[in-house]
Image (spheres, helix red, strand yellow):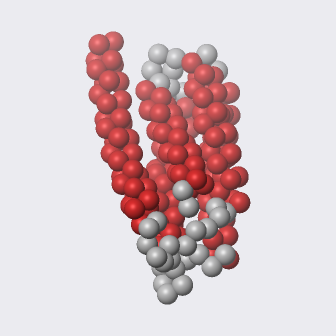
Amino acid sequence: MQMEQKVKERTFKQMLWIAMISMTMMFAGLTSAYVVSRVREDWVSFELPSAFYLSTILILLSSVSFVLARRSLLSGDHSRSNLFLGLTLVLGLAFVFYQFNGFNQLIEAGLYTTGPESNVASSFLYVITGAHLLHIFAGIIVLIRVIYKNMKHRYTVEDHLGLSLAAIFWHFVDALWIYLFLFFFFIR
């Protein structure tokens, strides 16, 4: 049985890595298109909304809380792992809230995604951050499932594959946001 578990774990991790590499390539393509489009005559530079700065801090904290949740589970403390998983969920939802707050700040600054008042730069920003938000929503759904399973004590010190895979994905979307934030901060 132990060998079957190791094969299952390796298979699922490989599938997740392939998916994350595909997502990385998609965002590399989008950010490359952004860079190429900057030479257009109608390009408009903009400041990042202040809400994006706060959301960056929140997603970093959510990764820290996920690490603490996994450590707590591996030490056999389900109640602490539940607490930290719940905190991760709250921080993830707060990230989403501040992303939408940032979109509102962009609109208030006259930066629209479509329509006659839109521009290429802001449209790229909306598309790229919106695509990232879709991945965050997927992570939140997975996180809710992990919290439910952990509350039912379905994860143990020996068998915690679902939680570990969710943590890898969550840290991936965190790192992806940091890349996107720094990209938009330095390349406007």
- The residue sitting at the top extreme is 2
Q: Nearer the viewer, residue 150 or 152?
A: 150
Image point 69% across, 59% down: which residue? 51
Tell which of 77 and 11 is nearer to you: 11
Count every numbered label the image shows and give the total: 0
Q: Would residue 137 be visible to someone looking at this image?
A: no
Q: Residue 105 sits in which quadrant? A: bottom right
Image point (50%, 73%), residue name: 43
Identify the image quadrant of the C terminus.
bottom right
Determine whether 181 is above or below 15 in the image: below
Q: Name the residue: 52% across, 80% down.
A: 118
Q: What residue do we see at 46% from left, 51% from top?
A: 135
- Between 11 and 105, the one lying in front of the other is 105
Q: Relative to 181, is 68 above or below?
A: above
Residue 177 in the image: state x and y as whole percent.
54, 48
Image-based side of 54 in relation to 2, left or right: right
The residue at the far bottom in this view is 116
- 137 relative position to 51: left or right: left
State the image coordinates of residue 10 (x, y, percent, origin top left).
32, 24
| Drawn side of residue 134 relative to residue 52, left or right | left
Q: Position of residue 101 (x, y in %)?
A: 66, 65
What x and y, as percent, mark residue 2?
33, 12
Residue 52 visible (yes or no): yes
Q: Image height check: is 4 above or below 129?
A: above
Image quadrant in which the N terminus is located:
top left
